[in-house]
Image: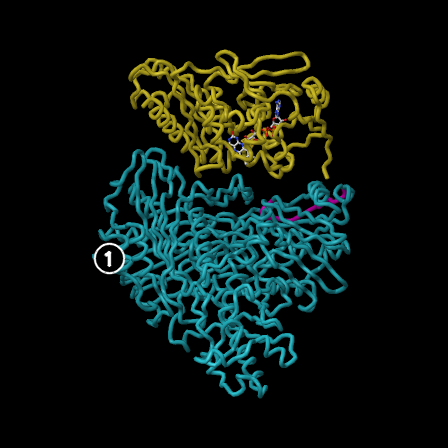
Chain colours: A yellow, B cyan
Amino acid sequence: MREFRYERPATVAEAIRAVAHDPEADFLAGGTTEVDLMKDGVFHPDLLVDITRLPLRGVRRNGTMLQVGALTTMEELAADRTLMERAPFVVEALLRGASVQLRNMATIGGNLLQRTRCRYFRDPAVPACNKREPGTGCEAVNSVARMHAILGASPACIALHASDVAVPLSALDAVVHIQSEEGERLVPLTQFYLMPGETPDRENVLRHGELITAVDIPLPPEGTRSIYLKIRDRASYEFALASAAVAVIMDGPVIKEARVAMGGVGTIPWRGFEAEEVLREAPATPDTFRSAADGTIRDPFVVPGTAFKVELAKRTLIRALTEVTS
Amino acid sequence: MTTIQQPRILGAGVDRVDGPLKVTGQARYPNDVNLPGMAYAAVVRSTIPSGRITRIDTTAAGKSPGVLEVITHENADHLGEAPATFIKNPQPPLQDDVIRYYGQYVAVVVADTQQNATAAAGLIEVDYDRHEAILDPHDPRAERIKDPWGEDTAWGDVRTALKRAPVMIDQTYTTSENTNNPLGLFTTLASWDGDTLTLHDSNQWPNMIQQVVAAMFGLPRDAVRVLTPFVGGGFGAGLRCWSHIPLAVMAARHVGRPVKLELTRPEMFTGLGHRTSSINWIRLGATRDGRLTAIEHESLTTLPLDGDEYEPCSSVSTWSYASPNVTARDQQVRLNIPWTNFMRAPGDAQGNFALESAIDELAWEVGLDPLEIRLLNYAEVDPKTGRPWSSNALRQCLEVGAQRFGWSNRNPEIGSMRDGHELVGYGVAGVSFFWYQQPCSATVIVRGDGSAYIRSAVTDIGTGTYTIMAQLAAGLLGLEVDQVEMQLGDSSMPVGTAAGGSGLTAALGSAVHDACGRLIKKFVELAGTDPFSPLADVPFGDVEVSEGRLFRKGEPTRGESLARILAVHGLTELSAESTSTPNSADQMGMTPAGARGARFVEVRVDEDLGRVRVARIVTVNDGGRILNEKLARSQILGGTVGGVGMALFEDTVTDKDTGRIANATFGDYLIPVNADIPDVHVEFVGEPDAFNPIGVKGVGEIGLVGVAAAIANGIFHATGKRMRSLPITMDAVMD
Ligand SMILES: Cc1cc2nc3c(=O)[nH]c(=O)nc-3n(C[C@H](O)[C@H](O)[C@H](O)COP(=O)(O)OP(=O)(O)OC[C@H]3O[C@@H](n4cnc5c(N)ncnc54)[C@H](O)[C@@H]3O)c2cc1C
Ligand code: SF4
């Protein structure tokens, strides 16, 4: 048996200390990513610090903000009434993810940190994977890549960031609370993830031993309409081939304000700033939507298996915009 | 011998008799069995597709906690050749350093716990001399085998007929590799006692495992006992003696303890075979009004380097429709891939997709309703021999299905039926399934209390063998179903055949039928020796049986119970054995027909995104006599789900350079989820089949066949796009 130690500290400070002082230690939340990858032989922590008993669970309303404890499960957050009323697309993204069993285990902090589903990353028998073993190359670029990214990708890595809920959260400019021994820092989700570049093993700004304690979700103004459209091969229990999170404030036939992000296409949850520019103060017409889509899916990096996603992603966004504005 | 009363329980949708055991966790599957002192094995698989092992270092693994033994080709026992049983079995593992495919076993580790075995397996280092692998069926270097089974068929003059045909369809249809994926992880628990061996093993044919293992280990057959009372599904995966089985046996001999080897899900993808991909070239010639004048069907399927496989994809074209000119030819190509193997409806599933798509194309070409063209070309008799069918209700399947589905509501124009963003399409496919039957033995025994049991070394892979054989015998012996127990899954029982080819019910049922007849005869003879018996001088032909009693026809009070006859003669049991063998078509003067069916589906295609949803399915099947409507319906439902999987999702993907199966997990290999399956209307039509005494045609596989073609045909009706390659994914449908 591959042995490891297990600790379940009672306080945030102890948990952070335990991981910070052991370079081979990992936090354990719901375990639906961490334990899977341990079983697959991809992760080999010598210490698991179980954080599930820390007081970081639950959703609090704070003015125009929802503060979500990092250990709130996906199902718990999906049941939040305020969220359902004000930003239903977050709830939709949660409920279209994984399965109910997984969502009862999986936490919001863990969800943001889930690892890519790349089949080459997840099988240590494959020698080339820059994300798993920096400098070894990328097997996926030349292989089966249907589930991979087209935006933010590089020849060094085309791994998709597969979180659903991170997509509407990026659109809403959610903010991540990060705690370390030095103190707390706040990072907007749109600046939390890193593009692979030459270092696909570095996925986000988190340093070893830093703990996500909460995520702030700014609530959009009343009257905002939103949608999360997830396109995949089968009807449920699958990651997105393309997804679109869109929130709009309408003024008659004109879009006053829009937030756009896409999933299934990016190495990080893909905020569509260009699309938002196009949509702001524009009439809700097919032409507008097409330019918004063209603005979002720009300079894709495609391999044969992902080429179809360019048009699929655009049409997914157009469909989401059509539905949310009509 | 018509003394036996018309069975009265047949057909009833009796609940699965093993249901309560299964849902309460009491049914012991091979991986549920634990023995005292048992050790655990974990396998190591090759990570190259072709080459030789140059070094294998087991030092670290050998020192790993709990490890009892590490076996590689360097210290493996030399084993005997694996005999072919209907089809070849893999030759014994670890006999040399040659690698033939990615995922081949190169070592097995035995330890005190599964975790220790698995961890140590990860410590084994293997160096290879990698050779270039042949992985592409079109690779000119690959060995091609023409007419692999000597079954290529031709009649008439296809070439001339095609040349003269006013209408011709000439197309290529391809299907992907699929993996059987039974839910139960295949497990072998091997336990030696001196020179005898007991195996608790997941398979579909215990006597086959017994024979192959005995040969490899140089044992008399009787020295090997294979127990498979329950198996968590098979879909064909259990029809060969796969290499993990001798590995477990060898490991148990090395450590002198029982050894359990349970495969992991990824290992199930490389270790148990998979459905071959197929390329089908079809040419149809027809008159302008849609009557077939020629069918030419050629197929190419794949083989591993050292195995064989029976997948005659083209054969469906020799019996499905009436055509005066037919050629059907198959070829295989050898690749450095894991074994290809039977999977639910081998050959037929792929061949039907091709033929039924081509027939549909022809219907559009000549402007005929796709339903009409199938009725028009219905084969009244076996088109190859001109003999009558033993039964064939394809026409009824199509007609009844069309009615249930509401086919007449179909607007024939492409893309004319729409609902919001969705284009609606109706698709139909006919199914003519192959016929298959092998010899099978069974013993039927009546106990002193009048109850009965049946013994045969077959398996119930979830199809309901336990239940339907109890029903069959109960009907024949005049007992209640719960008075009859089917005992199976033990190689020491009367020799059973495979639960495969949809042929078990006919084979075993015929044996049970005959054994019951013989048994009644024995009872009548026994009663005849007792001058006080009310049946003393009643001739056998005048005896009927009901409620556990024999009595004179038309005179129910003149009789005696089976229990009493045994008691009078001081017997605790009376038994009769029978071995069924399939009838000969020549002697019967008819062609045995497999099951027949029709599929009607409504598909909905998102016009922008290309996503296909199946909204409704009507599946009508002729399975001859249906022994248990509920269980038969379950078979058709499960097959339908498999058919939707084959059509839209299932695709065992191989990395083109390494030959590694890239999606060997349930996260990556998509099978339908509940949300993908609409309401399915299942119906049975037809008559008892004339080829076997109980009138059945198996229904284990047919449910899957035709679903893919009906979906593809529906997509064409919805979109005008012809999908000739499976699975049909949105990128192909999207413009
Ligand atoms: C079969 C399957 C299907 C799935 N489908 C979907 C899907 O459709 N959509 C989707 O979005 N997701 C999907 N997921 C992913 C799932 O949502 C994530 O695995 C889950 O959200 C992770 O949360 P967890 O609490 O289990 O994290 P864990 O597995 O416990 O942790 C994940 C990682 O984050 C670290 N970590 C956890 N919490 C913290 C914290 N507070 N601070 C710092 N580090 C932390 C851990 O050390 C670990 O490395 C699927 C997963 C599976 C297994
Ligand atoms: S895409 Fe990224 S994660 Fe996948 S093999 Fe390439 S480097 Fe590894």
**Residue B635 pos. (x, y %):** 46, 55
Q: Residue at x 21, y 57 (%)?
A: B289
**Does the magenta portion include B429?**
no
Q: Residue at x 48, y 72 (%)?
A: B582
**Residue B81 pos. (x, y %):** 64, 63
> In this rendering, does residue B29 appear at all?
no
Q: Count up the numbered dots.
A: 1
Q: Is residue B607 left or right of residue A183?
A: left
Q: Residue at x 24, y 57 (%)?
A: B290
Quadrant position of the C terminus of chain A in the picture: top left
Q: Is residue B483 left or right of residue B64?
A: left
**Residue B386 pos. (x, y %):** 33, 71
**Does the magenta portion include B55?**
yes
**Residue B476 pos. (x, y %):** 49, 72
Chain identity of mark 1: B
**Ligand 1 is located in which of the four quadrants?**
top right
- Name the residue carrying label 1: B290
Q: Is residue A261 above or below residue B465?
A: above
Range drawn in magenta: B48-59
Amino acid at pointer 1: Gly
